[in-house]
Image: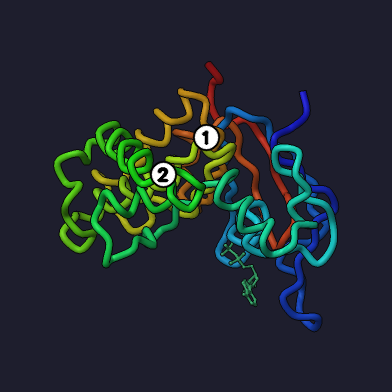
Amino acid sequence: MDPLISLHGVTKRYDASTQPALDAVDLDIEAGRITAIMGPSGCGKSTLLNLVGGLDRPTSGAITVGGVRVDQLGEAAAARFRRSTVGFVFQFFHLLDDLSVRDNVAVAALLAGRSRSEADAHADEMLAQLGLAEQRRKFPAHLSGGERQRLAIARAVINRPAVLLADEPTGALDRHNGEIALALLEDLNRRGQTILLVTHDEVLAERVAHRIVRLIDGAIVGDQPARMVA
Ligand code: ADP
């Protein structure tokens, strides 16, 4: 089977005079797994995630996600790709503070072309699944950190993206809420969600990931299975 995500000779230079953030990276990722990208700060983890998610373009090399050459997309096509094929979860949630909990989720479905009533119904379903049904009329400012991250996860997966990209999703959470967020990601994965997880937390990666890819200075230096694969 073809890999869901494929990087071939991917280099990203933000600045011509410095070392590239990614240096000729080759990486294939199968569907259905949790793959952790690990390495010290500045090694290129977020850059890799942003390139796979079509938020930025490589300086050279090819990136394919679900059969789409992401590196060749124009701006409008990249925006469509981001709405339909990937979901993002960030360390600091990136929620829309002026929208209710329900609207934070529904807006992602509206942007993907659903009707208002479909988007609302779907958002309510997602929120119920993630234990946030009671909070749906509240605003993000009135949620705990753990609830905010659950909300961000609900928004990220409402359009059933081929891949969920999570950048330090537990980085701003205490241990208890971090555990809840992780359990949620594992649950989504058990139902088939492919997840690419950036973290510098060794314990977390060992626990949830099927595979750990290690980066140093923009190059892959390790690539191993992380736990018994069911
Ligand atoms: P990590 O996520 O592993 O901490 P990043 O991908 O954020 O690493 O960064 C990799 C390298 O690229 C670092 O040297 C960082 O300073 C640089 N970098 C990241 N984003 C930018 C940017 N927008 N402009 C210039 N340099 C950047």
Residue assigned mark 2? 115
Check mark 1 vs ligand 1: CB closer than 8 Å? yes or no. no
Q: Amino acid at mark 2?
A: Ser
The residue lying toward the viewer, choosing from 61 and 44, is: 61
In space, the residues marked 2 and 1 are separated at their CA atoms by: 36 Å
The residue lying toward the viewer, choosing from 211 and 59, is: 59
Q: Secondary structure at mark 1?
A: loop
Answer few, some or many: residues within 10 Å of disc 1's Cα (few below 14, many 20 plus, some between 14 and 19).
many
> Which residue is painted at 36% across and 35% down in the image?
184
Position in image of residue 104 (x %, y %): 33, 54
> Which residue is painted at 44% across and 57% down in the image?
90
Placement of 26 over or under 192, stated as above or below: below
Placement of 185 over or under 138, stated as above or below: above
Residue assigned mark 1? 209
Position in image of residue 59 (x %, y %): 80, 67
Q: Secondary structure at mark 2?
A: loop
> Which residue is painted at 57% across and 43% down in the image?
196
Is label 2 or label 1 in front?
Answer: 2
| Contact between labelled residues 1 and 2, with CB atoms less than 8 Å apart | no
The residue lying toward the viewer, choosing from 211 and 163, is: 163
Q: Quadrant of ligand 1?
A: bottom right
The residue lying toward the viewer, choosing from 60 and 210, is: 60
Q: Amino acid at mark 1?
A: Ala
